[in-house]
Amino acid sequence: MNYSVLNTDALVIGTGLAGLMAARSLTKKLPDAKILMIGNGLGASPYVHGFNMMLHKDDSMESFYEDTFVGGREQSKPELAKALCDGSVELRPVLEELGIEFNRKDGEYSLLRPLGASHPRVASVGNHTGVAIMNAIRDEFAKNDNISSLKDTRALRLLRIDGRVCGALTYHINEKKFTLVIANAVVLACGGFCNIYPFSTNMKDIGGDGIAMSFGVGADLCDLEFVQFEPSAAVAPAPIRGKSVITTMYYEGAVLRNTLGERFMLKYGEAGECVNKDVQSRYIFKEIKEGRGTENGGVFFDCTGVGRERLNEQYDSYVKRYSDVGIDIATTPFEIAPAPHTSLGGIAVDEKCFSGIEGLYACGEIIGGLHGANRLGGNAGLETMVFGRIAGESVADYLANASKADVTEDDVLDFVEDTLTLSGENVVTKEQLDAIRVKMQKVLSEKLNVLRSCDELEEAINEIGDLLEELDDSSMEGIDEELAFETIRLVNDLQTAFLLALSADARKETCGCHVRSDHEEEGKEKYRVVIRNTPEGTVVLKESI
């Protein structure tokens, strides 16, 4: 395979909010550092409607932390949850510097109350908060020659030499070429992995690369079993399938109905729809499975009670989305169902975003340990910016004292050849890759969905393991760069699916968004499932919290 080599001080993998904030804080603290950002999409960042900020007069740090920690079934790493809440306060001057102003009405902040929150807390900028912040940061970067970016580029493997991560092998999708980027430090800001499922709210650029890359260099992974299913993902019409609707509407009059017109959530408690997302997803899934679902396999989201004026004022992006496909949500309920939305697990980092592997830092959805077993609405957008800022500052501190990465020509050659080689004899084909991906997604959909059981999880481990072995027994000799890229991408997604199955099997009881049909009672023990790659093989641990 042909490849080129680039050198930089810091490599930021991901160009969404987390990556942009990391690069910004890095360059603020270490202005002379050369930063290269790579990505082939923006993940969920353009769709961030708003995020949690303590702007309500009755809100407090104590209340915010309690909501976050208790909402996560007390499985969160306390120092990460605290860093998130503290960071929301420290974020305010950063946003002011970027010229970001939150929506107000009659002089007061226009705040929405997310599920699981004690107070209204979601602040927004118009209806496109993520876009507004990204544009503001990009405007700054346009004046800084030390920050460059490679679009349409995906990282596939991390380079580790003598225990230190010092680069990544990347692939440019349009130019169809590999590039090894050598860097003195790497920031993983590449998002979660929910798009390995066949139906999710995630964009196509999201996948399992971040998990597989970090696992490959020996970083600890935690909480992978906690996949949060968004309860309100569109199942129809086809053009908006997978697009989610913000659940703050439940506090403003929206309700859920089954195909019989029943407001079924009232069967499960007086709070109705105003429960945490994991609980709501569980009961929606149950309603559908028991035959009271809609024609397209969902339930009805009925926001007619919110009123047209309020919908137009606060939720106009959703009004437009459905209007574009012929539905007036002010008068007509629409079909939704739970879909994988946020992977709560990922790289186990400390409150400084350090992975435990020299030279490797992480921020955004790729990290684990923050949300525990359930994420509160509004904390995802906040996470990207708070931990993006922290990661950038931590890398700046590291680079200020670190030596230049020592990578020889032999190191480069060995790494690239090892990455672009499989051990088998039969040359891989596009048809084979497509068939394996379909099989993987079938396993994920049937055995790692909202409800899980011991037998199904053990079957999932074996079936995904077999698919990995099938690929490993293939060969990439003589194939072109594009097929080689697709092969490595599939290996990464399979590796992530396998680790997800291992982690889910290790937690034998229900906990938050990890629901075991064979042990429905919520587990009381507080521990974290940690997966580690060692020379002896994969190790699965249970660490007490």
Image: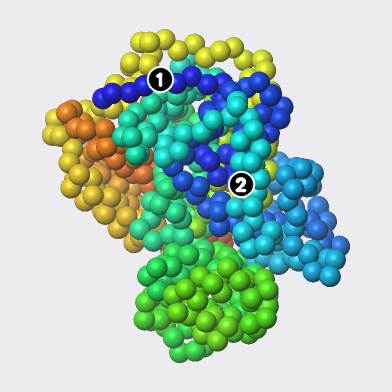
Label 2 residue SS: helix
Q: Residue furthest left?
A: 426
- Nearest the eye: 467 or 231: 231
Residue at (26, 53) in percent of width and height: 439
Residue 494, given in percent of the width and then of the height, sits at: 33, 44
Placement of the C terminus among the 4 image quadrants? top right
Q: Is residue 455 above or below residue 494?
A: below
Residue 12 placement, left or right of 68: left
Residue at (38, 10) in percent of width and height: 409
Q: Residue furthest front?
A: 143
Cα–Cα gap, marks 2 and 1 = 29 Å
Residue 396, given in percent of the width and then of the height, sits at: 66, 25
Q: Which residue is mark 1?
A: 5
Residue 268, given in percent of the width and then of the height, sits at: 58, 78
Examine the image and state in which quarter residue 303 appears. bottom right
Placement of the N terminus among the 4 image quadrants? top left
Q: Type of residue at label 1? A: Val
Q: Type of residue at label 2? A: Met
Label 1 residue SS: strand
Q: Which mark is residue 134?
A: 2
